[in-house]
Image (spheres, rainbow, N blue to C red):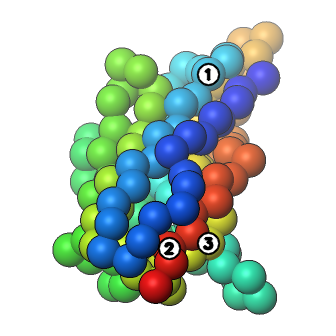
Amino acid sequence: QVQLVESGGGLVQAGGSLRLSCAASGRIFSINAMGWYRQAPGKQRELVATITSGGSTNYADSVKGRFTISRDNAKNTVYLQMNSLKPEDTAIYYCNAEITYYSFGRRYEYDYWGQGTQVTVSS
C-alpha cells in the first residue's frame, strides 16, 4: 500500500510563514503529479498548487507570489513554502499524489491523499 504523511502545519500570525511537507512511501513505481489542496470550514476543497515530475508548477491565483511548491523526487516528497500568510489561508491542507505501481505484472495508476494538516492564521 501507499501512504502520504504530511507535516508542518500549525498556528501562525498573519504575515508569517510555514512550510508543509508530504512524504510518500510504500509500493511506488513512479510518482507523476503531486500537489496541495485545502479545505476551509463550510467550503469545498480547492487546489492550491501542483507540480509535475518534471518540475512544472501551477498555482491558484489566490496564492501566486506567496506560496512555492517544490519536490524531491529521490525522497518522494513534496513541499509547500507558504509566506505572507493571511487569515483566509486558514484551512486543512491535503497532499495529493498520482502514483503508478505494479502488482502481479499489472500497471496501476491511482490518486492518493494524505490525512490533512491544519493551518491556522490569526489576524
10 Å crowding of disc 1: few (<14), some (14-19), many (20+) = some
Q: Nearer the viewer, residue 82 or 36?
A: 82
Pick whichever of labels 1 and 3 is earlier in the sequence: 1
Q: Seen in the image, is 12 located left or right of residue 53?
A: right
Horizontal arrangement in the rendering, residue 95 relative to residue 30 (left or right): right
Residue position for label 1: 25
Q: Amino acid at mark 2?
A: Val
Distance between the alpha carbons at the discs numbered 3 and 2: 9 Å
Q: CA distance from mark 1 to mark 2?
A: 30 Å
Q: Residue at x 66, y 79 (%)?
A: 40
Q: Quadrant of the N terminus?
A: top right
Say what amino acid the circle numbered 3 marks. Ala
Picture disc at residue 87: none
Coordinates of residue 16 in the picture (x, y in percent)? 33, 66
Query: Mark 1 or mark 2: which is in front?
Result: 2
Quarter assignment of residue 7: top right
Q: Which residue is mark 3?
A: 91
Amino acid type indicated by mark 1:
Ser
Where on the picture, by quarter, is residue 83? bottom left
Residue linked to disc 2: 121
Residue sitting at 65 percent across and 65 percent down?
Answer: 92
- Asked if the residue under mark 2 is in contact with the one under mark 1, i.e. CB atoms within 8 Å, the reply is no
Q: Which of the marked residues, 1 or 2, is nearer the chain's N terminus?
A: 1
CA distance separating discs 1 and 3: 25 Å
Q: Secondary structure at mark 2?
A: strand
